[in-house]
Image (cartoon, rainbow, N blue to C red):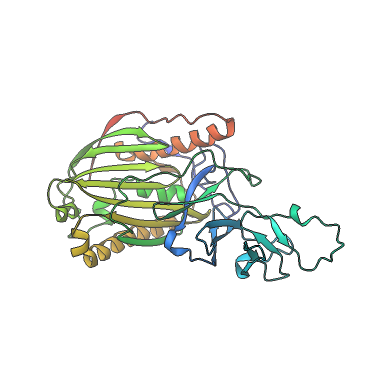
Amino acid sequence: MPDDALIAPTAAKAATARAAPAGTFGEGFVTDIWYVAALAGELKPGKMEHREILGEPVLLGRTRQGQVYALRDVCPHRAATLSAGRVHREADGRETVECPYHGWRFATDGACAKIPSLTADSALDVAKVRVRRYPVAEQQGLVWIWMASDPRFDGDPSEPPPTIPGVVGGKPKLIDKLDYDIHIDHAVLGLIDPAHGPYVHQQWWWRSKASQHEKQKRFAPSEAGFTMVRHEPSKNSKAYAILGGEPLTEITFRLPGLRWEHVMVGKRQVLALSAMTPINAGKTRMNQIMWSDHPIFMLLYPLIAVAARAFLRQDGWIVGVQSQGLRDNPPLMWAGDADQQARWYQQIKREWLASRREGRAFVNPVKAVTLRWRT
């Protein structure tokens, strides 16, 4: 694709938009895939939380036995928000969600367990009343939710959630999150863009605008995405210096909006995961999580936490600046190898949607290549 190639102009869409024609940028969502719904510690036993995910109202909960579940957060009777109700314990020990309006109760699999207003001789088969159940899974301290293209889907996902390498050292050492007022496509481009660092992230502990050099990195296709193969970090990235030794880093992007950097320093590891989940068509949640068994995280945790928080909010600031310009629906450009990861993202998204629509295996369009840019 030539350097001056244009992305099709974007347009704001209603929050209810779920899917878009293959290749449409800034519209719709990748479906039939796992998203990060919450951090495991956010869901307390016996409690419920309301979330909006891909424009859909979702109730996230955890039973007192520790099992996570997700239901559409709308009662089919009068559309009351189920998460505004309470958790009820049935006579058989099951936990159900009780609607605050008329007390209809739903099991964690979505099946209706009770309609209190019915008399004993009612002809209504309560078992046929349901709310949508979303498949969820908990692993590596994350709660994942499967967002299917078909709202009637009630089976098991075709694959398990991603397993992220380098989740070491027990619980995450750092957790932060920020909501971006922008579509996930634009948020992802900021996540995988290597050229904005010296302009957006000007800090003494990172790099300055004056410190730019030509970079050359090898990339390879990986599961539903691509990987910058393991290499020595750039010398002008000061943050790596605190790790000591000779760090080697590998950076992976995976649909729908996951980017992780896995750093090895001898036998010690650092993992920084950025997980983006669309709230709706105009808002995206960024979850930033770090794990490590490196002793530096114990010694310098307050400084690392402040630096990571500042880094994320710098990205949030530039997204705010960008979102103002996007209101005018302008054409956008790709420019050189620095934007190749953005091209790949669009190609991968298009292929993922096409493969799901056509009922075939995903074919990764990324080929192994060496890219060059200045930053």
| Corner quadrant of residue 107 | bottom right
- Of 251 and 121, the residue lying toward us: 121
Q: State the image quarter where residue 226 is shown.
A: top left
The residue under the point 80% across, 55% down is 125
Instruction: Specify the quadrant that holds the N terminus.
Output: top left
Numbered-mark total: 0
Going by the image, does 194 lie left or right of 66?
A: left
Q: Position of residue 282 (x, y in %)?
A: 51, 56
Q: Position of residue 42 (x, y in %)?
A: 45, 64
Residue 330 visible:
yes
Residue 206 sits above or below residue 1 on the image: below
Quadrant location of the C terminus?
Answer: top left
In percent of width and height, residue 199 lies at 26, 54
Q: Is residue 39 left or right of residue 215?
A: right
| x 37%, y 60%: residue | 316
Which residue in the rendered view is the most extreme toward the front?
92
- Asked whether 69 or 55 is in front, the reply is 69
- Residue 208, can we see it? no
Nearer-the-camera pick, 287 or 131: 131
Pinpoint residue 26: horizontal percent, then vertical percent.
Answer: 49, 46
